[in-house]
Amino acid sequence: MKQIFVFMAMMWIGSVVMMHTANADTPITKEQAKKFYKDCVGNNLALQGMTPLQRDYFCSCSAVQMEKNLTVEDIQNFSNQKTPAGRAAMVKMLERVQFPCIIRPLGDNVRDECVRRASANPQFAAGGKKYCGCLADTMMTYVKKVGVAETLYRVNMTGEVRDPMESLLSSSGYSNELIRNYYSCFGGVLP
């Protein structure tokens, strides 16, 4: 799933530029959003960490958010990350399109991995569903409240451009929160 954000935005830039000559604040059309969705869903290489259902959700959500929150100029500016306009477009894309759309797939992944591990332990399997639901919910809440801002700060400070889910999962804040919630959810499930 490495560099999904960069790859998807770059593959889409060409189609937007070819479909439209932009003026100031040119809205993204429904046709452009639909093209993005089709390209995104069909891109198995960049979305390897997602199930087909998660991929469909992520691509659909991203297309809707892109149409609502970005302009053709944002997409065009995104192609040059070394300029202030390019960096601003990247941050806007992350903040308003990518991050809102990865929270649910991220929660699904946390829940699925937890259920897989819990089912391997017969003593824990009975409470595993409740525990794993707690863990997924608390991690999605963390990502909404803190994780996105933390990751955007890191992107702004370092210029690091990676796939948003990878950026979140590799952050020390996320790792620390996951460990804290392992224990917090465990106490709320087992006697």
Image (tube, rainbow, N blue to C red):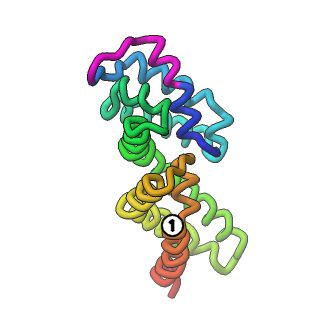
Q: Is residue 174 above or below residue 74?
A: below
Q: Give the amino acid at mark 1.
A: Tyr
Q: Residue furthest bottom?
A: 191
Residue ID at (43%, 25%): 76
For this rendering, which residue is in front, 44 or 137?
44
The quadrant in which the N terminus is found is: top right
Where residue 176 appears, as percent x and y from the top left, is: 52, 74
Residue ID at (50%, 17%): 15
**Crowd class of label 1 (few under 14; some 14 to 19; many from 20; radius 10 Å):** many
Residue ID at (37%, 30%): 74
Residue 147, visible in the rendered structure: yes
Q: Is residue 38 above or below residue 83?
A: above
For this rendering, which residue is in front, 153 or 62?
153
For this rendering, which residue is in front, 59 or 88?
88
Magenta segment range?
12-24
Where residue 155 appears, as percent x and y from the top left, is: 47, 53
Q: Residue furthest right?
A: 120
Where residue 184 appears, as percent x and y from the top left, is: 47, 80
Where residue 64 appears, as percent x and y from the top left, is: 37, 31
Q: Is residue 67 above or below residue 1?
A: above
Q: Residue furthest front?
A: 83
- Asked if the stretch drawn in magenta spans residue 15, the answer is yes
- Asked if the stretch drawn in magenta spans residue 119, the answer is no
Residue 97, visible in the rendered structure: no
Q: Is residue 141 above or below residue 50?
A: below
The residue identified by callout 1 is 174
Give the quarter of the image for residue 42. Answer: top right
For this rendering, which residue is in front, 75 or 177?
75
Residue ID at (52%, 58%): 168
